[in-house]
Amino acid sequence: MYTGTNKTALKSQQRILDALLSLIHEEKYEDITIKNICKKANISRQRFYFLFDSKEEIVIYYLNQFFVELAQYINDKKIISLYDLIFSYFTAIDNNENIKNFMRINTIMPIFINVLLGFLDNIHILKTNKSMEQRDLYANRFLSSGLNSIFLYWIENHKEIPLNELTDIIENILRGNFFK
């Protein structure tokens, strides 16, 4: 994936992303081809492969943008409580239709979880000023899968409880209070 600062390349990356996001509303993710993305973005396949190696890299590019913005928000607001971290995460996802669409695509969920792991690692370092230990890595994997699974369940059940209640449940689980 292109990571430089060339303005033309960055604009092309954005056009490719916009094309993919548009196509997802028209057809299944699995049926979208690089050729379709290039046509929609009005760029050549050669240009596409200069910027991205695959369709999945476009998703990673988008998810990275999302999580960088979320980390910046958490850092700017000086959010440190477990409740506020969880609530901020769920609110950000709930307010982003593209992220919710990506979460529902089975082939993207492993990508989503991996990018979320990087975000959790980053938040850990920002909030503790300590490097990750082995136990932290296990905890983040648990959190990544669990948070996404719970969020999807909440969406599938038409948000039957308010987000603050959902956050309370998760906080109580993580604090060991739920199964007492």
Image: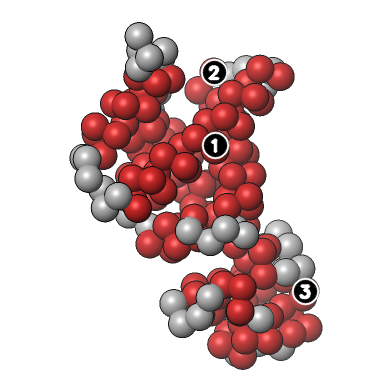
| Residue that badge 3 annotates | 50
Residue drawn at the location 44% of the way across and 33% of the way down: 75
User: Do we see residue 33 in this rendering?
Assistant: yes
Instruction: List x then y, in percent, for residue 76.
Output: 39, 35
SS of the residue under disc 2:
helix
| Residue that badge 2 annotates | 128
- Going by the numbered disc 2, the residue's amino acid type is Thr
Q: Which mark is residue 144?
A: 1
* Front in this rendered view, residue 167 or 3: 167
Instruction: List x then y, in percent, for residue 86.
Output: 38, 32
- Going by the numbered disc 3, the residue's amino acid type is Phe
Query: Dot 3, crowdedness within 10 Å: few (<14), some or many (≥20)?
Result: few
- Going by the numbered disc 1, the residue's amino acid type is Ser
Q: Are marks 2 and 3 in contact (CB under 8 Å)?
A: no
Instruction: List x then y, in percent, for residue 140.
Output: 58, 29
Kindly report the distance in space between the C-alpha atoms of the residues bearing marks 3 and 1.
Answer: 31 Å
Residue 122 is left or right of residue 132, and the answer is left
Residue drawn at the location 66% of the way across and 25% of the way down: 137
Query: Dot 1, crowdedness within 10 Å: few (<14), some or many (≥20)?
Result: many
Reading the chain from its start, which is encountered first: label 3 or label 1?
A: 3
Reading the chain from its start, which is encountered first: label 2 or label 3?
A: 3
Q: Please state, as top left, top right, bottom left or bottom right, where the C terminus lies in the image.
A: top left
* Front in this rendered view, residue 30 or 140: 30
